[in-house]
Image (cartoon, rainbow, N blue to C red):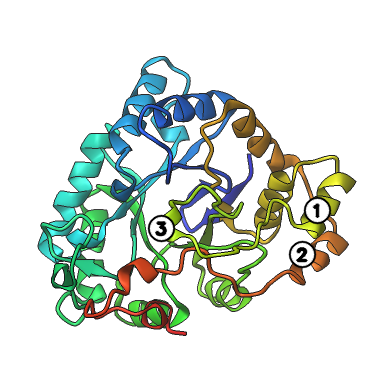
């Protein structure tokens, strides 16, 4: 397993994503992944499956397959708990569901806020403007969670470089991580450079193109990564699968990568990608595929009257 060192911790560079993993499937997927050798599990309350993930984590520890110290478990603060007084309670709920006494990494899921009683908004009135719930105040509450030993590290998801700069300007504890969409169609080289200079790691979500997203989150005629001719050619050259090439590409860029699967064979194939090393010419060919195409663009938060826009979320 490949690890990245960050200050006083080492994080597995490869992990299991659990977004879109259905109830009844994610429990077995986590158990299978841990038996294969995965040690990094990425979770979130928004995925509505943390209780099943926690059941699998507990059973694998009880059966001595893994020890807690060998695991890296990430979860996230959902948009309805941005008020500082709600942050610790949200984290405690996640810890209860995951059957853990602490997280390794706790992330702000989106730079978007909902009212506390709203899980997913149905009208513009369900949102809170960030002027009312500033990210810096939410961040201070996360810093307190570190002080209390509830999480080892903290970070963010879906933050632009501008939002990271604003956060760093007022932070006592700097973010360890920015988890963002990264794949050959959205390579975000400027973000990669920005974060490297500031000792912030990046986690790549949707690294395989997230073709199993709900229909409501998809656009017409989305380009496919897994059937891309360049990716397929590199896969054939290395006697690998396209998915393995995409995972290896993420690792070659020194980013953490968390592909999701509930299929035992694909879990094994994805894990084997850690041993695949792409050549300079492979990376150069993939670099030409960048078209700035965002699959998860946040448009589901940009309803008229919500106060949020796609351009505002990404500062583009």
Q: Quadrant of residue 57?
A: top left
Q: Is residue 117 left or right of residue 297?
A: left
Residue 94 position in % (x across, y down)? 25, 43
Say which quadrant the N terminus sits in.
top right
Mark 1–mark 2 distance (CA, rounded to whole Å) = 10 Å
Mark 2–mark 3 distance (CA, rounded to whole Å) = 29 Å
Q: Which residue is pictured at 29% across the width and 80% down the height?
A: 170
Residue 189 position in % (x across, y down)? 63, 74
- Residue extending farthest to the top is 63
Q: Nearest the camera: 66 or 264?
A: 264
Mark 1–mark 3 distance (CA, rounded to whole Å) = 35 Å
**Which mark, by number, is residue 278?**
1
Q: Which residue was labeled with disc 3?
A: 216
Q: Which residue is pictured at 43% across the width and 38% down the height?
A: 21
- 159 lies above or below 57: below
For the residues bearing labels 2 and 3, Cβ distance under 8 angstroms: no
Of the two numbered discs 2 and 3 in the rendering, the one whose residue sits closer to the viewer? 3
Q: Residues within 10 Å of mark 1 (few under 14, many from 20)?
A: some
Residue 222 position in % (x across, y down)? 59, 63
Q: Which residue is pictured at 70% across the width and 36% down the height?
A: 272
Of the two numbered discs 1 and 2 in the rendering, the one whose residue sits closer to the viewer? 2
Q: Which residue was labeled with disc 2?
A: 286
Q: Is residue 100 visible?
A: no
Residue 267 position in % (x across, y down)? 59, 33
Q: Nearest the camera: 256 or 230?
A: 230
Q: Secondary structure at mark 2?
A: helix
Q: Earlier in the sequence, mark 2 or mark 3?
A: 3
Q: Nearest the camera: 99 or 244?
A: 244
Q: Is residue 98 visible?
A: yes
Q: Earlier in the sequence, mark 1 or mark 3?
A: 3
For the residues bearing labels 1 and 2, Cβ distance under 8 angstroms: yes
């Amino acid at each position: 397993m490949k690890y990245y060192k960050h200050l006083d911790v080492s994080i597995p560079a490869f992990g299991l994503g659990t977004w879109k993993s259905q109830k009844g499937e994610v429990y077995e997927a986590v158990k299978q992944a841990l038996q294969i050798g995965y040690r990094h599990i990425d979770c979130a309350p928004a995925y509505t499956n943390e209780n099943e993930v926690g059941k699998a984590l507990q059973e694998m520890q009880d059966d001595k397959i893994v020890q807690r110290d060998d695991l890296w478990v990430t979860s996230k603060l959902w948009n309805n708990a941005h008020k500082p007084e709600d942050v610790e309670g949200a984290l405690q709920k996640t810890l209860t569901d995951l059957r853990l006494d602490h997280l390794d990494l706790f992330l702000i899921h989106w730079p978007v806020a909902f009212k506390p009683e709203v899980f997913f908004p149905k009208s513009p009135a369900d949102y809170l403007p960030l002027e009312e719930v500033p990210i810096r105040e939410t961040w201070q509450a996360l810093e307190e969670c570190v002080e209390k030993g509830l999480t080892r590290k903290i970070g963010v998801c879906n933050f632009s470089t501008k939002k990271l700069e604003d956060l760093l300007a007022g932070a006592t504890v700097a973010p360890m991580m920015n988890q963002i969409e990264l794949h050959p169609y959205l390579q975000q080289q400027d973000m990669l450079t920005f974060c490297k200079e500031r000792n912030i790691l990046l986690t790549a979500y949707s690294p395989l193109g997230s073709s199993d997203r709900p229909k409501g989150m998809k656009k017409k005629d989305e380009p496919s990564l897994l059937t891309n001719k360049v990716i397929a050619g590199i896969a054939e050259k290395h006697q690998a699968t396209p998915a393995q090439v995409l995972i290896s590409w993420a690792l070659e860029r020194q980013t953490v990568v968390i592909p999701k699967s509930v299929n035992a064979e694909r879990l094994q194939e994805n894990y084997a990608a850690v041993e695949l090393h792409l050549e300079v010419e492979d990376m150069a060919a993939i670099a030409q595929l960048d078209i700035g195409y965002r699959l998860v663009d946040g448009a589901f938060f940009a309803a008229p009257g919500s106060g949020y826009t796609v351009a505002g979320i990404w500062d583009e």
